[in-house]
Image (cartoon, rainbow, N blue to C red):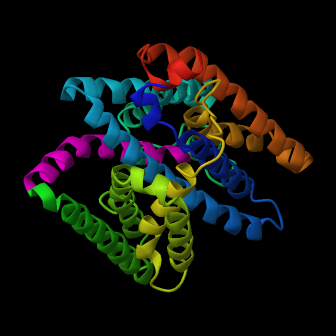
Amino acid sequence: MSSSDQARSNRFDTMRLVFAIAVMVAHIFMLSDLPGSRPYQQMSGIFAELSIRGFFILSGGLVYASWLRSRSVGQYAAKRVRRLYPVYSAIVIACAIAALIFAPEARADLGAVGKYLLANLVFLNFLHPDLPGVFEGNRFSEVNGALWTIKIEVMFYIAVPILVWMMGLFGRFKFALLVLIYIAAEVWRAGFGHIGAEQNSGLLIQLSRQLPGQMSFFVAGIFMWEFRALMREKWWMFSLAGLTLTSASFLPYGEPLCAAGWAALIGGIAFSPGPELNAARFGDFSYGIYSAHFPIIQLVIALGLFQVTPFGAAAIAVIATFIIAVFCWNFVEKPFLARSNWYRRQSG
């Protein structure tokens, strides 16, 4: 095993797959909104929120490591674009094409379709999340409401070179800088969230969820990567501390503990001894699952299948999502990756 492969000896890929599936399950409950499903929506929503935060933590570690392995800003940027944009743009364009084929309203309003494409292809999904005549009878009309996190991922990517430069300026106090960013992010999220709740402002609540409100999870991921050797050695201590802090984050005023606790728990599990559980052996399907599941669930709902057979409709949505994810990996994601890429080498 090469030194690069040893550094990747963890369970991050398995966790990403679990997180993507958790978000998909939560959206099945939320979007279908079947009678009696509200408790399941709430429970699955908690796991989905943790999963999204888990994605941000893993991105903090893996994207930071990608920067450290890159020889230049250009190489780093090219790796990030090849990893993120092909499937993202393919899903956005495919939804627009499907709307033009099957929705007369879309063909009658090409300007709105163009706005949808323009906004979504540059990650500004919130500006134009809908397509004319598409999912208008569903509980939510957004074509792909899961894509809001991709915008944050892109902003993380842009922030990394600046963050590493600042860490260099701080020298041996670089971790103090990360702690300050962590605190500032928590203040941002708690502050705007509290004011938004008091004023019943959806805009302020959404603003609390954007950057820099998510930076605490990203820098927690950087901490996890920097201290991965210690986590391998003391994995049980990090797991126990992480579980304690993550649980405490659900108590009143405890949310600022979530990023630190969740990162410690993720790291403890990822670096603990035992089978590696290589979920990327046949391909990295987690990104495809995350990117494609929302419009697929919306389509199954629009066809009325959840009213006929809820379990059957959920199964159809899950199976269709996995099929699309496998297709995207083999014919969209993988061809754009460099031959030396970890995931490409793992899947042959």
**Would you say residue 153 sits in the magenta stretch?**
yes
Q: Position of residue 204 (x, y in %)?
A: 37, 69
Q: Position of residue 279 (x, y in %)?
A: 64, 35
Residue 233 visible? The answer is yes
Q: Main secondary structure of the magenta part?
A: helix
Q: Is residue 96 above or below residue 48?
A: above
Residue 97 visible? The answer is no
- Which residue is located at x 50 percent, y 75 percent? 245
Nearest the eye: 64 or 77: 64
Q: Residue furthest bottom?
A: 252
Residue 174: quarter of image: bottom left
**Would you say residue 336 sits in the magenta stretch?**
no
Q: Position of residue 293 (x, y in %)?
A: 64, 39
Q: Is residue 3 above or below residue 190?
A: above
Q: Is residue 198 left or right of residue 145?
A: left
- Which residue is located at x 89 percent, y 42 percent? 312
- Which residue is located at x 20 percent, y 66 percent? 176
Q: What span is in magenta?
A: 145-169
Q: Is residue 251 above or below residue 203?
A: below
Nearest the eye: 288 or 131: 288
Q: Residue furthest front?
A: 233
Residue 11: quarter of image: top right
Total tally of numbered discs in the picture = 0
- Which residue is located at x 32 percent, y 46 percent? 156
Nearest the eye: 245 or 211: 245
